[in-house]
Amino acid sequence: MKRSEILKNSRFRYRLSIPAFVLLVIGLLLACQPEDKDANVLPGERYKTEFEAIRKMVYENPSLAREKSKKIISSISNNDQQSKILSLKYIGSSYAFETNYFEAIKYYKQALLLAENINFYFEIANLNNNLGTIYNEFGNYPSAYIYFVKALKNYDLAGTIEKKTGTLNNIGLTYLNLDKKDKALYYFQKALNSSNISKDTILTATILNNIAICNFSKKQLKSGLNNLHRSIQLSQKVKNIYGECVSYQILGNMYLERNAFSKSLDIYKKSVGIAKNANLIHLLSVSEVGIARVLLAQGHLSEAMMYAKRVASVAEDRASQSLKADAHQLLSSIYEKNGNSQLALKEYRNYVRMKEEINSNTVVNQVYDVEVDYLNQLTGMQRLELEKKQLSIDNRNIWLLLLAIVFIMIVGGLYLSYRYHKSKEKLKLQETIIELTKKKSHAALEAEIRERKRIGRELHDSLGYLLSLAGLNASVLEKKTDLPETKKSEILSALIQSINEAFDEVRNISHNLTPSLLSEQGLAGTLKNIADRVNQTHQLKMSYDTFGLEQKLDDVVENILYRTIQEIVNNTIKHAEATELFIQVAKDQNVVTLMAEDNGKGFEITSLEEGSNFGLTHIRSWVENLSGSIHVDSKLKRGTITSILIPIR
């Protein structure tokens, strides 16, 4: 099978198991529900009707909802901060429904800043929930989880505990995206069993849909169908057209994944009819994407082409990047089956470009952004604490001075001197902490810049050369039509080889950025993969042993060990001139040990202290951040032994 087909099929199966945009929409809808009457703050009476209409309009016509929200902002007074917060929130939600996540995050954070200034706890919780949902879509699950926890805390402060159900559902979606089905089911069941769930039929139907997705992924077909049936009944009972349509889409995906094409087609057509009657344009297009995939699988290429082009037209009108990506992927597969490889490649490149636009500077940079935001917030809190302490010290000094004058001048003076000295030491300590925090923030930014330079260098040095070579061969084929067939065949073969090598480079770069094998097979499986790839070069023989890795390690510890092993292997290949490398990873109840030994030329430890570190500085930094230790034993002509200990918390 061709590499392009493998890539497309892998993405195809993922999108069938979990419709990501639908889950994002569900998460946002749960946080856009109207405020309860007993919420701690309510918007101004003047705009309540408008906000109710905008809330319903957000997922039906996002651009119109955004326009109306901006009109409200332009007309409200500076004192009406609550209405401004709600307007900014709905503008952010309108961008989120169009998959323009950068604009959505910008408006959500503006609203969050205003809400925190006036302790608008209910909307602080809603905004944190929305931000968590978007970061969940990015794949930045640690940050998503942090936002969801903040949402739960602020719902408690707002006295709207019943609203926590939606956030518990979103945490379940986070674990579902991480392929932790049991953990996801735990949170979905927790949300389903909450005391107020019977009052919210729409939310109950949503949670049942999510539980059904887990059931299908765990091959529990009967349970999944029962939960979907319950969800559909609830949606029909309260005329929840949106939830009913989503339920049928999930059902259609399940049948399509199991190659039950006839059933899948009937279900998708049913969801199309529901979406048409309710004028839910985006859901209509999502259902038509499913129909196109069924027709493509059945070999009805002309009909599949019709649906794909219709989806592309709607995506263009609605400026929906997710629909554009689906349309390009469908068209690429259709052209490939038609034998039109040139158009198939063109559409596939458009699909890759759309996915890159959606994810550009997100997955790579979100960790840095969250860390920098956190450090900045921490700095602000420390400054506020310093101001409070300084004010407290001033008041105390005045009070002590008055006591000293009234009672004993000498005792009061000594006491003031002592207190002043202690306060000065505390201020110095706090100033030192702020300075260290600033340096850490600066280091995070420098790390981001280095990472961007590295990625750019890899793309320019490897991928740019291959694409230039492919373009050159294509240009020769286009301009010189009189070439002999043998020459044309030779140039075409070179062109195809360049494209295949470019795909290999893209896959390698992607693998280095996000090691999917690590999450799928754990550290032991990843170590085997690294050893196999090294041994294929016949330049270095690599062997390994693992002990105690039957259970998955903590994600952070596992990732650091993976990066450390990569660095050690690279250093051995580039600098050690070794023929053999042995790596051992062992885990007990308290510590993880990594030992690497090569038979290379070695080096003097004193040169390591003088700055010639061959990449060991990076390893030392990673290990020490986990409170671990590293020891390097090496001498010239004797090889190198590297030992690393990381405690398990």
Image: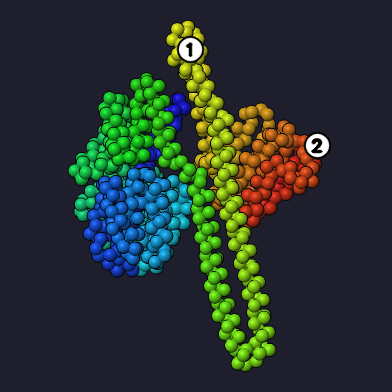
Kindly indicate the quadrant of the structure image that contains residue 328: top left
Q: Kindly identify the amino acid type of the residue bearing the numbered disc 1.
A: Ser
The percent coordinates of residue 154 (x first, y second) are 40, 64
Left or right, 518 with respect to 258, comes to right
Q: Which mark's residue is nearer the viewer, 1 or 2? A: 1
Residue 378, percent across and down? 53, 61
Local packing at callout 1 (Cα closer than 10 Å; few below 14, some 14-19, many 20+) is few
Calculate the distance from the C-alpha at mark 1 to the C-alpha at mark 2.
Answer: 52 Å
- Of the 4 image quadrants, the one containing the N terminus is top left
| Residue designated by label 2 | 637
Q: Residue at x 36, y 39 (%)?
A: 321
**Which quarter of the image is occupied by the C terminus?**
bottom right
> Which element type, helix, strand or loop, lies under badge 2?
loop
Residue depicted at 27% across the width and 25% down the height: 302
**484 or 139, nearer to the observer:** 484
Residue 50 falls left or right of residue 164: left
Tag 1 residue: 489
Q: Earlier in the sequence, mark 1 or mark 2?
A: 1
Q: Is residue 267 visible in this depiction of the protein? A: no
Of 215 and 102, nearer the camera is 102
Q: Secondary structure at mark 1?
A: helix
Of residues 52 and 496, which is closer to you in this image?
52
Residue placed furthest toward the left: 277
What amino acid is labelled 2 in the image? Answer: Lys
For the rendered model, the colour scheme is rainbow
Quadrant assignment, res 150 = bottom left
